[in-house]
Amino acid sequence: MEINAGSDKRKAIFENMNEQGLEGTSNGYEKFQAPKTGMVFNSDNEAFDYYKNYGECEGFGVIRKSRKFDENKRLKYVTFSCAKSGRVKGASSNSIKPKASSKTDCKAKINMIVDDDGRYTVGYVKFDHNHALRPTCNQELCHHAKRRLELNDLADISLSKAFNSSVAEPGSCENLTFSEKESRNCNEKASKLRLGVGDAEAIHEYFVRMQNKNSNFFYKMEFDDENRIKNVFWADARSRAMYESFGDVVTFDTKYLTNRYDMPFAPFVGVNHHRQLLLFGCGLLSNEDTETYVWLFRSWLECMRGRSPNAFITDQCMAIQGAVTKVFPEARHRLCLWNIMKKIHVKLGGFAEYKEISNNMISIVYDSITSTDFEENWVKMIETYNLHHNEWLNSLYVDRYHWVPTFVKDTFWAGMSTTRRGESMDSFFDGYVNSKTSLKQFVEQYDKALRSMVEKENLADFTSFNSNIPMITNFHIEKQFQEAYSIEIFKLFQDELRGLCYCNVSFVKVDGQIVTFQVRENVTVGDGSSRRMDIYNVLYNKVECEVKCICRLFEFKGILCRHAIAVLSDQCVNDIPSRYILDRWRKDIKRKYTYLRCSYFDLSTSAQIEWYNRLHEKFKELIEVAMESTEKCEMLSKILDAGKEKLVLN
């Protein structure tokens, strides 16, 4: 169920819930009915939004309190509670910087039972609060009030003055149907929807111009009730073609330009065979709620011809997570590790043992080889430092399957773990965008940034084809990777080869065709002043020449780990099977998108490109003729099959 802001949000939640319904109030506005056992919701977000909005009407905040899973790790019970639940500590853990607490150990809550179909049923409700509820008023701004606030904002009248003028009108504050906070939210939303002079025309002209140059240029625009541009998405023909080769892993980051330049820019990003950034399209957004992200994701999915990414990395944002679940249900969703770990200081900095806790947590997250290692060490940390009631850590533990490395390494992530990499959006747009860049200027600079992206890839291709990184061993395996992989990926493989000197292989057992080896690796700890011994089990099938390590580096990055290489070397394997040389990282594959002529990069000087474009036009003419009848379509299909067979033979 899609949810809109304000009253639309309330209506959407209850529209399909006749039994729960809405109650009328004396002033003609809507009021949320109190929760009761037996209420059924279709999703976690729908249930939480209901209780949160009920809390807003009654005057209390709401939090996600706890979740319980069965032995198969399926969610069975969820508790939403008053935001003041939880006990107040008798003394601050940091006597120098004590933090205020609003906790009163309030018991008001609702318990939800999750069935096998993913439906949430209210099983228990407790209404009583042990604290005063905040005064409430209807939160809706009428159209007249919204328009008046917006006009005041355009006239540079401060929000406080505008709100106070409303209070001073007949009827006074007790009859005012909105608060200053809602006024501010309204103005902020309206300011996002407003474009500068010429922005809307420039964006539309850019889209039309790009589509005239290449019919595969895709764009979509959404308008609000007053016919103003609300959200925009676009992707050029090259970006769409690149997705066919490198769309297995996609990251989505809305923070870079939004935080630095107040530009609501939302790019879809991947990496190529040089681990360089690729842009798979982007949006300009008016809001950051689930409804907006659902619109954007569906627009992008339509652009990519319905092909969902295998893996999707986003920030830890509930609105984005809800949209991912709705639009990409089959994609493996991962939360940005960098964004989570950077919050350690903010969330745990008040503890006296902060440094110990921080070092402990970093070690648990990055050094846990198996999920069992993580679970045991995490529980030990919680108990050691008495962190049982830390809501942030509890929420992270619930979401561990979506961010902890050891839980996600069963999926290929192209080596990416965050939405912000070294060569991230910072370097991608630096030099093209600044704090004074208008949207009109942005669409013009956007092409320049894309041209730079193509130039960097062409240079990396040239370098990979015309130079080599010297080998560091005499292994034929290294020679295979040197000839196949781009320089950047080959360097990563050589890092694994260097690690061989710290690995020691020993036989464990044989079970049919599977031989188990144990690889002991001497690992540097911290600043290098100490070392530890890590143990990895490696399974080897001699008949099929298959090797699988518990560290799962190959599954995660597509690069054989030092532990697997050590076993292959021990077994005198000289030629690596082709399954361990991924096409994704190869430098000797000519990919379709490199033939495309794009508006921001002239490739017409290449004979191959020229032939590609000429043949492409001829095929378009043939298709137009063939579409006149089924018989002609069948005839063209047979001609093409025969022609393909001759080309392959020659």
Image (spheres, helix red, strand yellow):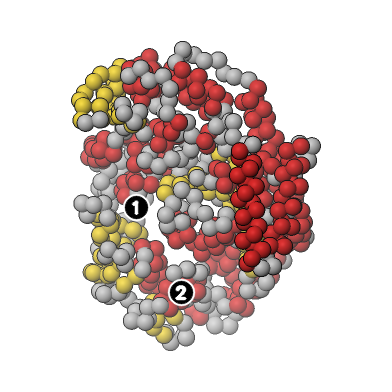
Hey, which quadrant is residue 106 in on the image?
bottom left
Q: Mark 2 to mark 1: distance in Å?
A: 34 Å
Q: Position of residue 547 (x, y in %)?
A: 34, 29
Residue that appears at 46% across and 53% down: 317
Residue that appears at 41% across and 69% down: 53
Which residue is under mark 1?
A: 101
Residue 365 vs 597, above or below: the answer is above
Residue 338 shows in the view: no
Precedes in sequence: disc 2 or disc 1: 2
Q: Amino acid at mark 2?
A: Ala
Disc 1: CA contacts within 10 A as few (<14), some (14-19) or many (>=20):
few
Q: Position of residue 73 (x, y in %)?
A: 26, 51
Disc 2: CA contacts within 10 A as few (<14), some (14-19) or many (>=20):
some
Hey, which quadrant is residue 128 in on the image?
bottom left
Q: Secondary structure at mark 2?
A: helix
248 vs 68, left or right, is right
Residue 623 vs 333, above or below: the answer is below
Q: Secondary structure at mark 1?
A: loop
Residue 204 shows in the view: yes
399 vs 444, left or right, is left
Q: Amino acid at mark 1?
A: Ser
* The N terminus - image quarter: bottom left
648 vs 201, left or right, is left
Q: Are marks 2 and 1 in contact (CB under 8 Å)?
A: no
Which residue is under mark 2?
A: 12
* The C terminus - image quarter: top right
Q: Position of residue 189 (x, y in %)?
A: 59, 64
